Amino acid sequence: MPRTEDYHVKDLSLAAEGRRRVQWADRDMPVLALIRQRFAKERPLRGHRISACLHITAETANLARTLRAGGAELVLCASNPLSTQDDVAAALVKHYRIRVYAVRGENRRTYYQHIAAACRHEPSVTIDDGADLVNALHTNMRRHASSVIASMEETTTGMIRLRAMEANGELKIPIIAVNDADTKHLFDNRYGTGQSTIDGIIRATDFLLAGKRVVVCGYGWCGRGVATRARGAGANVIICEVQPVRALQAVMDGFLVMPIAEAAAVGDLFITVTGNTNVIDVPHFRKMKDGAILANSGHFNVELNLPGLAKLARKLNRQVRKGVDEYVLPGGKRLYVLAHGRLVNLACAEGHPASVMDMSFAVQALSAEYAVKNAGKLAVKVHRVRPEIDQWVARLKLKAMGVRIDRLTAQQRQYLASSHMGT
């Protein structure tokens, strides 16, 4: 058992249930299991310290087991105050001997104390979901950054921050954009966020989607997934977008597209997935109908202007239902905010299904191995995931699903490599 100063979790007595959840998730993560078997034999991460700032879930636990099997000395902290599964955190400490600093519902001060603990681990590799860990290594914890070979980033919001740092000349660590891998964003973002967001909303509210007007702000891969799942449940879906190409895609996909200033007056349920701030703002709250529900599935809790809503409201009722806050506006209109504006899929449900996280975390594990093998060779910039990693993960996932695909013939390979064959 690690010493108590080497971890901070809610209650170690929850560990047995946490281990059952980890084992259940593992059943649906065959690609990561194959990597773990190889890592246990080859130990490619031996001698390396890894600090990971991720959602502490059963799926993340199986990534942690894989990194540990590869020989890494690992520390985990939470990437969101409301996403930690306390029983899983306890299981990681008690049964898997992994240092964890994460408690569901931790306040801002504790959250950043946990990130500082991960920095003090003196990592050679970091794994981030939202770039809070890398940001700390560039600001108040920069003295711990000198040994970092590279960092992997898991989410769109984190990539927005890191690309801004790169553009501004502030980036000091090579970044591998795991979020941008095809086997991540085309599946995790679309199918994982799509299903888990709707799951979280229904668990929190018992809301019937059929026949309702659901406003989805953002039509990136996450927004597409949410919109598709809502439409599949019978909702009339409205898309709000700022990028013309994405807006055009939404129109071509059969969705109604309009500005949020117009959608605010007609929506029953509002879901933000943009990675931006104040997407739904005070003027929009004023226009909403009585009983409108607001949820965010972007990484940070800034997409809904909740300080502005609190000032506008004459009364705030916390927890009218678990995970639901009621804001009563002048005149008696009520608006309901889920999960304090934080990630609704993790705060009110269990996050992405293990099957889709199998691919995302397989890419994470293989990218960590790639970073270690290329220590000192990676330029300080944002790097794409190696194409062969993407292809390998996709091939193994298909095999695990029992799906077979065609292979190019010698003639077809020759044709694709030639410029001499024409009409």
Image (cartoon, rainbow, N blue to C red):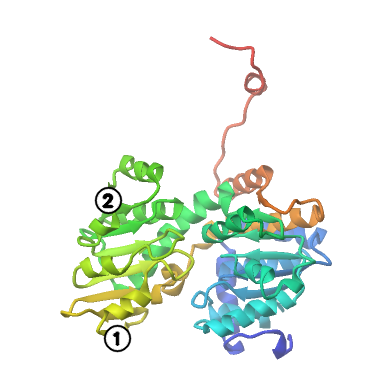
| 308 relative to 63 in the view: left or right | left
The answer to which quarter of the image holds residue 336 is: bottom left
The residue positioned farthest toward the top in the image shown: 423
The quadrant of the picture occupied by the N terminus is bottom right
Q: In the picture shown, does residue 53 fall above or below 94?
A: above
**Closer to the N terminus: mark 1 or mark 2?**
2
**Residue 294 showing in the rendered view:** yes
With respect to residue 382, does 20 lie above or below? below
Extreme-front residue of the structure: 168
The residue nearer to you, when weighing 256 against 25, is: 256
For this orientation, the residue located farthest to the right is 47
Could you tell me the amino acid type at mark 2?
Met
* Residue at mark 1: 317
Q: Which mark is residue 201?
A: none
Reply above or below: 164 against 320: above
Q: Amino acid at mark 1?
A: Asn
Q: Position of residue 80 (x, y in %)?
A: 53, 73
- The answer for how far apart the CA atoms under marks 1 and 2 are is 31 Å
Q: Residue at x 31, y 43 (%)?
A: 251
Q: Quadrant of residue 92?
A: bottom right
